[in-house]
Amino acid sequence: MVPVLDSNKMPLMPCTEKRARKFMEKGDAKPYWKNGIFCIILQREPSARNYQEVVIGIDPGSKRTGITTTTEKRVICNQLFDAPSEVKKKVEFRKILRRSRRSRKTPYRKCRSNRKIGGIPPSTKARWGAHLRVIDFWEKLIPITVVSIEDIKAESKKHCRKWNKNFSPLEVGKAWFEKEVITRGYNFYKFQGFETQSQRIHRGFKKTSQKIRDTWDAHNVDSHCLCELALGNIKPFFGILKCEFFKWSRRQIHVSNPKKDGIRKQYGTTRSLGLNRGTLVKHKKLGLTYVGGTSDGKISLHDIKSGKRLTQDAKKEDCKILTNLRWRTRIPPMVKAMGLLRGKNL
């Protein structure tokens, strides 16, 4: 399915590829790309603004997350994300640097009370916040009404009041995510793992034990079943869009380890010669690339699919700025449907 926007870029109900192609051939619509998702913008007033239920199914995992967006009849997109995993190490490293500064004769802020007691750990918030960013992205392209997620539970300990009060970052993050989704005005559905499994068996879908594979049957099979539990049976689509969030080094005063003569060079930023890193540009020779780091008045350009650095000596004036990207996308090879199904009753 192809997302459709009106002339003011307000989301309408998506259409099929065939209808989108006819709109563009007649001049009634123009193509529009947003973060690797192809859309069309109508150049006339739509004949009707009838809306259906649109659901996002989320299957959260420790390393991968599958997200499926569907209408009542068709799948719009299957996405596979890598879960953010670098936050915990960064927080630990920040703690080490702060403690080392307090042992030296250098200005530092006063010690604060322990803010780790209560609230959401940064690593947990990063994981669940990534789900919210995807929802906020799709909200600009399609009229979302329902968010469906697999309920994850963690066992509590007996005879331990302190542990049971805030016993699991998983439970805390899940509660925070649910509150944020309801605040945005969506209908929020939670289903247990055995319900997802029952729906998968009923539909004849197979699930692989290799959770890190870039295939539909790794995580998107469950996210598709979560959509069906909310809306009813939907014709599956086995193609996926692999998405990887950009990881930038945030701006720091200087690097942690000094070089010769105690000199510490500056390190980290999210901008290169006035451009946001991750900006999609069209280079004269390299074509479509995105902006990376900078050095000696030049910028580095990276491949939009693999992330491989193509050059470090690109001039800013040789790049045509197109748009800002949130993540890098690529389309893995489709898996044969017969290898994923145990039956033909779709």
Image (cartoon, helix red, strand yellow):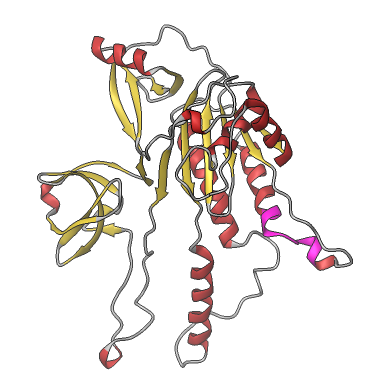
Quadrant occupied by the N terminus:
top left
In this rendering, the answer to whether 28 lies above or below 268 is: above
Which range is magenta? Answer: 163-172
Q: Say whether residue 114 is magenta.
A: no
For this orientation, the residue located farthest to the right is: 159
Q: Residue at x 56, y 80 (%)?
A: 110
For this orientation, the residue located farthest to the top is: 47
Instruction: Tell me the quarter of the picture where residue 301 sits.
Output: bottom left
Majority SS type along the magenta span: helix
Instruction: Tell me the quarter of the picture where residue 335 sits.
Output: top left
Measuring from the top left, give residue 344's x and y in whole percent.
Answer: 57, 21
Q: Is residue 186 visible?
A: no
Measuring from the top left, give residue 16's x and y in whole percent.
Answer: 40, 17
Q: Residue at x 63, y 22 (%)?
A: 231
Measuring from the top left, give residue 204's x and y in whole percent.
Answer: 62, 28
In this rendering, the answer to whether 25 lies above or below 36 is: above
Q: Is residue 32 visible?
A: yes
Q: Residue at x 80, y 59 (%)?
A: 156
Quadrant occupied by the C terminus:
top right
Q: Nearer the viewer, residue 214 or 34?
A: 214
For this view, does 323 lie left or right of residue 110?
A: left
Q: Say whether residue 165 is magenta.
A: yes
